[in-house]
Image (cartoon, grey):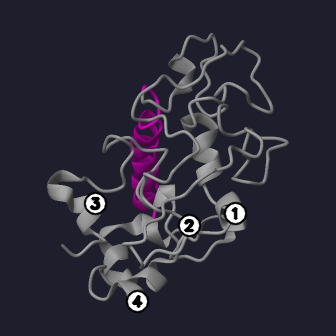
């Protein structure tokens, strides 16, 4: 039994720093953007007085989406309601990725000073008009039913793409969100992808082409 405990302790010591390093030095390490603060987590999380939109959320209510994907030729997709979008991870992501919000504007700031920064122009700036981005806020199972052999069965898609079965923010476990494809805490697969997209593997986890 003692040998088992020693082995578990050793594994914890090995894996814990590896997890921390997935944020440290990545694009989500906002402490590197011209600031004296060296804390990594404070830009999104706080141990006390956090917003309930996400676990110990330190950034208020986030940024609202003004438009979502919509196409008359893609009839398997039903646009989400405003309430569905508000209760999603999209406002959290857009609190930086809208390109306008100060990503240092946190509810409980650290002791060290934070610089006044917004995201630099580039592919990561999505704005609030997501009409030309992958649809979110819909039921994968419903879309799969309408798509008629164009989408993998949900169980098969989850096997290839575990992020689909999140059930985030009290939503149904099969709803498509930003975090279905992205893991904000892990940049091992750039840019924060859950699945390597070599040979379009990420896309093909869901789409049958």
**Helix or strand or loop: what does disc 3 sit on?**
helix
Label 3 neighbourhood size at 10 Å, few (<14), some (14-19), many (20+)?
Answer: some
Q: Read off the residue under disc 1.
A: 82
Label 2 neighbourhood size at 10 Å, few (<14), some (14-19), many (20+)?
Answer: many
Residue 121 magenta-drawn? no
**Helix or strand or loop: what does disc 1 sit on?**
helix
How far is disc 2 from disc 3 in space, using C-alphas? 18 Å
Quadrant where the N terminus sits is bottom left
Instruction: Name which of mark 3 and mark 4 comes first in the sequence.
Output: 4
Residue depth check, mark 3 versus mark 4: number of the one nearer the observer: 4
Instruction: Name which of mark 1 and mark 3 comes first in the sequence.
Output: 1
Instruction: Name which of mark 4 and mark 1 comes first in the sequence.
Output: 1
> Between 117 and 55, which is closer to the camera in this rendering?
117
Circles 4 and 2: CB distance less than 8 Å? no
Q: Read off the residue under disc 4.
A: 145
How far is disc 2 from disc 1 in space, using C-alphas? 10 Å
Label 1 neighbourhood size at 10 Å, few (<14), some (14-19), many (20+)?
Answer: some
Task: Name the image quarter holding residue 18.
Answer: top left
Q: Read off the residue under disc 2.
A: 137
Instruction: Name which of mark 2 and mark 1 comes first in the sequence.
Output: 1
Q: Is residue 137 above or below residue 38?
A: below
Q: Read off the residue under disc 3.
A: 202
How far is disc 4 from disc 2 in space, using C-alphas? 16 Å
**Helix or strand or loop: what does disc 4 sit on?**
helix
């Amino acid at each position: 039994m003692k040998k088992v405990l020693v082995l578990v302790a050793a594994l914890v010591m090995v894996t814990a720093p590896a997890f921390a390093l997935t944020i440290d030095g990545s694009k989500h390490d906002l402490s590197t953007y011209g600031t004296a603060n060296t804390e990594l987590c404070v830009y999104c999380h706080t141990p006390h007085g956090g917003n309930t939109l996400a676990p110990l959320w330190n950034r208020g209510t986030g940024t609202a989406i003004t438009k979502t994907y919509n196409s008359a030729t893609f009839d398997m997709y039903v646009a989400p309601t405003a309430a569905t979008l508000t209760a999603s991870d999209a406002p959290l992501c857009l609190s930086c990725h809208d390109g306008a919000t100060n990503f240092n504007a946190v509810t409980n700031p650290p002791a060290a000073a934070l610089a006044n920064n917004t995201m630099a122009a580039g592919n990561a700036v999505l704005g609030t008009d997501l009409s030309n981005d992958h649809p979110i806020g819909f039921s994968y199972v419903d879309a799969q039913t309408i798509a008629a052999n164009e989408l993998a069965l949900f169980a098969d898609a989850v096997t290839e793409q575990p992020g689909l079965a999140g059930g985030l923010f009290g939503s149904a476990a099969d709803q498509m969100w930003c975090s279905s494809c992205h893991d904000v805490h892990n940049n091992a697969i750039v840019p924060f992808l859950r699945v390597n997209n070599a040979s379009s593997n990420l896309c093909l986890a869901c789409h049958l082409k």
